[in-house]
Amino acid sequence: MTSAATPMAPVPYRVTGRRDETTDTVTLTLEPVERPIPTPLPGQFTMMYAFGVGEVPISVSRIGPHPRDGSTPGPVLEQTVRAVGAVTGAICGTRPGQVVGLRGPFGVGWEVDAARGRDLVLAAGGIGLAPLRPVLLRALSEPDAFGRVALLIGARTPADLLFTSELDEWRARGAQIEVTVDRPSPGWDGRVGLITALVPVADVDPGRAVAFLCGPEVMMRVTAEALTGRGIRDADVRLSLERNMRCGLGWCGHCQLGPLLVCRDGPVVPYTRAAPLMTVREL
Amino acid sequence: MTTMELAGLGPLHDALRDAGYTVIGPTVRDDAIVLTELESIDRLPHGWGVRLAPGGYRLRRRDDEAAFAHAAGPQSWKPFLHRSRVKLWEADRTGDGFEVREEPHPPARLALLGVRPCDLRAIAVQDRVLTGGRHVDPSYAARRSDAFIIAVNCTEPGGTCFCVSMGTGPQAGPGYDLALTELVGDEGVRYVVDAGTQAGSDMMDAIGAGPAASGDVERARAEVAAAAGRMGRTMPPVDLHDLMAGTLDAARWDEVTERCLSCGNCTMVCPTCFCTTVTDTTDLTGDHAERWQVWDSCFDPGFSHLHGGDVRASPRSRYRQWLTHKLGTWHDQFGSSGCVGCGRCIVWCPVGIDLTEEAAALHAEAASTDR
Ligand SMILES: Cc1cc2nc3c(=O)[nH]c(=O)nc-3n(C[C@H](O)[C@H](O)[C@H](O)COP(=O)(O)OP(=O)(O)OC[C@H]3O[C@@H](n4cnc5c(N)ncnc54)[C@H](O)[C@@H]3O)c2cc1C
Ligand code: SF4
Ligand code: SF4
């Protein structure tokens, strides 16, 4: 039996593409070996397994396309992984042709459909751009369904920017893209400083905008404050939280954040729900 | 509902075994009353009681032959339903990938004999966590679905018990197949029995139990009611969920942290604590991998590990997580309290930290800062 009957067993996916984003971050293209997992929604994550090493939560960074020729039984997925430890290191080290395991998809994603007809602000810190990419791609593929789209990106250095090969295409398809770095490198002529400095230049109407944020918690906190300061309603801001996760199924207890089980009630939660929790140290 | 009477538990034990059940119940081992498979009903701890105190557990001889007059022991029923180590699957490398084989979870037929009301509620609490959400834990479900539960109404609370505060005892709530009340007299012990399910009444019919004498039924009710007045501990009479939610910055957490060793004993003995982690291993060839699910504790610093550090790095934040989860956020997550008032965490804490005392101190602190 190769297919899994419960949500406990990893489903084999073949790595069919691999792109180095930065020195420590890789985007893998994944196709089901036999049976696909149910199609993820933007903002959902999988538990990604490196054979014999372990399993960690990783967001999907692209969903589809679903090959028309039926050459794979499910949509092609992309996941973008930063090597920070044993498991992510092993995942980043996989080569095309090799197989990883996926369980899921898990969690609550971005409310993309609720954002239809609205302006969209996407604010990403570091690897936080990965879970926002499917939202951007959805909005760009249905330009009539959404208003203006502003993508605000903060990275440590220019060398840490993700998806650089796609930024121009996204701009050409109508997205406003603003980038800032903490530390410039020689030749960088873009902005330097906090991502909050990009909030005033986002070309959206705050009264009709929805904002999705993903990045380190401090970054999300100050960015949410800046966005609501510009007049976006608290209730229209959502962010994606990170906690330790061992199961993704709501059983292991590791992803608690006060009243939340982040794997079940998140990772995407309303800012109004997260704000009081993010200010308590070591919650 | 008819109330029946049994002169002894031998016939019930036999009938359960004949029906294919493995009977689990209390017995004396290593100076404690532990739960184990009872091959013979004679292994019940007749004539044993316990003395319970913060950080202290002592067996004592009773001057009667009661089998269930001993409050909560070191174990709950948790190890039998939510096992401490469960193999989830194994996988082997194939030419260019791997093949996963899930571990089967064959249904178990467990009869749990002597489930105290607090522990009966604890089973319901774990049911909600492990089987009440979107995903059902197959290992737990396989052991839980067919379990036959024989509760025992409590007539002998211990010095660390507070089921009355938590609304879980001393009368067993719903969820049992049979509920016993033990009556002790000069002529030995006998049991007034309520059937809570059809399976329970069928079992009583099978062993030919007769109706209970009305005097015995009244005496049983009276003894359970009297037990409610003999709780060793109480919780402050406030909404504990709200108390916990408003108390995250309390000074009391610093005080309790001076005593707490972060050993995690409280989480291991607690009948509702459910947290687990997984371990992924390979054999020497590297071609065979396994994943096991094992109990974990929120007192382990690595429990909240993220790249960049542990979220709850300080012991203070870990004790706070434990208590505020038990009494507070459990309601938000699973719709009930995570504490059933069994008192185990008080007894088995090596330094005798008492959550009722901590809750009272937090309440006093909140009340004084409100003024
Ligand atoms: C919802 C969600 C989405 C995410 N999406 C992405 C994404 O798209 N891309 C990305 O790069 N990252 C993502 N992450 C972060 C990613 O999961 C972590 O970087 C990853 O878990 C690190 O694992 P590691 O083995 O490489 O690193 P390590 O830091 O070595 O941790 C290994 C694992 O072992 C466990 N562990 C480590 N030390 C201990 C200990 N002392 N005790 C107990 N357990 C321990 C932890 O649970 C940890 O997950 C996401 C996280 C979440 C929660
Ligand atoms: S927290 Fe303590 S008293 Fe409450 S159920 Fe757990 S072990 Fe029993
Ligand atoms: S409260 Fe007691 S049992 Fe629990 S971790 Fe602290 S010292 Fe150990």
Image (spheres, rainbow, N blue to C red):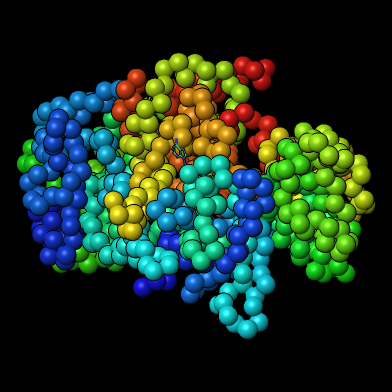
Q: In which quadrant of this rendering is ligand 3 seen?
A: top left
- Relative to A52, is A280 above or below? above
Task: State the residue at coordinates (89%, 58%).
Answer: A148
Residue A271 horizontal/vertical position (percent): 73, 44
Is residue B234 found left or right of A15 in the rendered image? left
User: What residue is rendered at 48% in x and 75% in y?
Assistant: A34
Of the 4 image quadrants, the one containing the N terminus of chain B is: bottom left
Locate residue B30: give its quadrant: top left
Residue B304, position as x, y percentages in the image: 51, 37
Q: Position of residue B334 (x, y in %)?
A: 51, 49
Q: Pick whichever, B352 or B193, lies toward us.
A: B352
Q: Residue A163 location, x and y as percent?
A: 73, 54
Residue B368 sits in which quadrant?
A: top right
* Residue nearest the observer in this picture, A124 or B55: A124
Dividing the picture into quadrants, the one containing residue A226 is top right
Identity of the residue furthest to the bottom in this view: A69
Does the image show residue B81?
Answer: no
Q: Please say if B339 is above or below B38.
A: above
Q: Residue furthest front?
A: A186
Q: Tell me which residue sits at (13%, 61%) in the image.
A: B17
Q: Residue at x 45, y 62 (%)?
A: A10
Q: Is residue A137 above or below residue A226?
A: below
Left or right side of B182 for B54? right
- Closest to the observer: B264 or A22? A22
Q: Is residue B291 left or right of residue B32?
A: right
Q: Could one spot residue B247 in this view of the protein? A: yes
Quadrant the C terminus of chain B occupies: top right
Q: How many marks?
A: 0
